[in-house]
């Protein structure tokens, strides 16, 4: 029974030309438009050096060294033109638009900008990366220091020599001097990648339209076919699961086509962690499917109204995650971070972004787990709604 309904659910969904267009063809067309619109932006942006200022209120040698490396004239790693000054002058430079922002280095370093833009977004993310790397190095140093003190058995040790030795080991182990600085330099950063990431996220979420259509087909209040299913001896849980699996398969095929098209036709580089990208896509498609199913079961309206609500939710999530302008993601992350923390489209976008720019997987796995929890929550709500549905007459 499961495979019989799976087969005909697959056939029914593929026969719906509008569903096929919006879930399979539309992301490909949108990717083509992105490529046409952004093809010349990369080259022009890579040539720009971002003017910034640094206000140093506390000593932070590793952070200062990283900034100096990325500000070295003529270097392949140059991203900034940096001026070290006091805060009053930095504020004056920012007010006169002589710099895009300044970094205040104290116990909790902070980026201060006047407006939102590509350069401001780059400054913020590069600073986040520097702080993350610095924090990781300090944790390793503290751990090694504690181990060395414990192994000394209480005997006096040369703290200065020990610290120099540990920092040397950590520096060699993490290779922090050149590796990650090269990854965030103007030559390697791709500012428009966020657009393609949000496209992948939107494609995953658009699978919700398939999930909604699959569930609507078996609901008694949506079609004559649903009425016949409701009075049949078929297990409703098997029908829902098989229909959802059919929709999920089509959704995955659409994402595979989108990846192949963007990689080989549009030459989009998703980085070296493609297995993590594939895993994220699987979970992202499940999240999109679950959102469509919950809309189908919770919203007590006709199919067009349900579809309109679902598309509106997806497009709003895509907008907030940076699809219509990469600065929007930065604005939301900075001012109302809770919105993007609950936004499934941003979870996918942010996880892809962290894979591309960051050397660790902490942020990636945090988004992946959040996405999985979102999918489970939506499916749980759907199951609850389906179990309590009863009809006085059909």
Image (spheres, grey):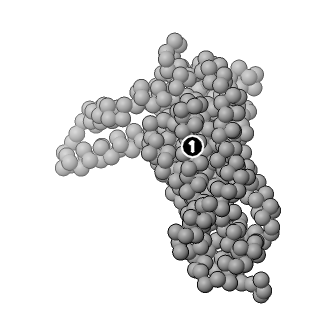
Label 1: state its secondary structure: helix
Residue at the (70%, 49%) spot, across then down = 22
Camera-side residue of 89 and 219: 219
Q: Which residue is mark 1?
A: 257
Camera-side residue of 306 and 185: 306
User: Where residue 180 appears, x then y in whole percent?
Assistant: 45, 31
Quadrant including the C terminus: bottom right
Q: How many marks?
A: 1
Residue at the (65%, 59%) spot, across then down = 13
Task: Write down the quadrant of residue 119 in the picture.
Answer: top right
For disc 1, the neighbor class at 10 Å (few under 14, some 14 to 19, many from 20) is some
Q: Residue furthest bottom?
A: 392
Task: Write down the quadrant of residue 48 in the picture.
Answer: top right
Residue at the (64%, 47%) spot, across then down = 24
Compared to residue 56, the image places residue 83 above or below, namely above
Q: Is residue 91 visible?
A: no
User: Where residue 302 appears, x then y in whole percent?
Assistant: 80, 67
Task: Write down the quadrant of residue 116 in the picture.
Answer: top right
Left or right: 75 with respect to 321?
left
Q: Residue furthest top?
A: 74
Left or right: 317 with respect to 5?
right
Compared to residue 235, the image places residue 370 above or below, namely above
Residue at the (54%, 34%) spot, across then down = 263
Q: Is residue 216 visible?
A: yes
User: Where residue 293 appears, x then y in whole percent?
Assistant: 66, 65
User: Where residue 114 appears, x then y in whole percent?
Assistant: 73, 32
């Amino acid at each position: 029974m499961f495979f019989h309904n799976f087969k005909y659910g697959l056939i029914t969904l593929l026969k719906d030309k509008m569903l096929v267009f919006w879930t399979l063809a539309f992301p490909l067309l949108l990717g083509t438009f992105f490529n046409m619109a952004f093809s010349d932006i990369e080259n022009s942006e890579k040539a720009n050096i971002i003017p910034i200022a640094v206000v140093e209120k506390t000593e932070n040698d590793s952070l200062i060294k990283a900034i100096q490396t990325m500000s070295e004239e003529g270097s392949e790693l140059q991203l900034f033109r940096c001026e070290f000054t006091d805060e009053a002058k930095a504020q004056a430079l920012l007010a006169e638009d002589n710099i895009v922002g300044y970094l205040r280095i104290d116990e909790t370093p902070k980026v201060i900008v006047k407006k939102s833009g590509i350069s401001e977004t780059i400054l913020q993310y590069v600073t986040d990366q520097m702080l993350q790397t610095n924090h990781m190095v300090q944790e390793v140093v503290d751990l090694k220091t504690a181990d060395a003190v414990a192994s000394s058995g209480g005997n006096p040790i040369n703290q200065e020599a020990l610290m120099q030795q540990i920092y040397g080991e950590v520096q060699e182990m993490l290779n922090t001097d050149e590796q990650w600085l090269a990854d965030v330099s103007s030559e390697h950063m791709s500012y428009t990648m966020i657009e393609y990431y949000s496209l992948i996220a939107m494609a995953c979420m658009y699978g919700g339209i398939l999930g909604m259509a699959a569930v609507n087909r078996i609901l008694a209040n949506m079609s004559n076919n649903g009425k016949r299913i409701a009075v049949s001896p078929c297990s409703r849980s098997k029908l829902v699961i098989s229909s959802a699996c059919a929709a999920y398969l089509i959704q995955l095929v659409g994402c595979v086509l989108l990846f192949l098209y963007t990689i080989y036709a549009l030459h989009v580089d998703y980085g070296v962690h493609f297995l993590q990208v594939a895993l994220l896509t699987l979970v992202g498609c499940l999240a999109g499917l679950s959102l469509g199913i919950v809309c189908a079961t919770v919203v007590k309206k006709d199919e067009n109204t349900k579809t309109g609500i679902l598309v509106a939710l997806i497009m709003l999530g895509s907008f907030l995650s940076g699809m219509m302008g990469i600065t929007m993601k930065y604005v939301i992350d900075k001012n109302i971070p809770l919105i993007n923390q609950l936004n499934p489209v941003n979870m996918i976008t942010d996880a892809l972004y962290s894979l591309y720019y960051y050397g660790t997987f902490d942020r990636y796995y945090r988004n992946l787990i959040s996405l999985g929890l979102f999918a489970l929550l939506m499916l749980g709500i759907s199951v609850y709604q389906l179990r309590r549905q009863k009809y006085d007459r059909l």
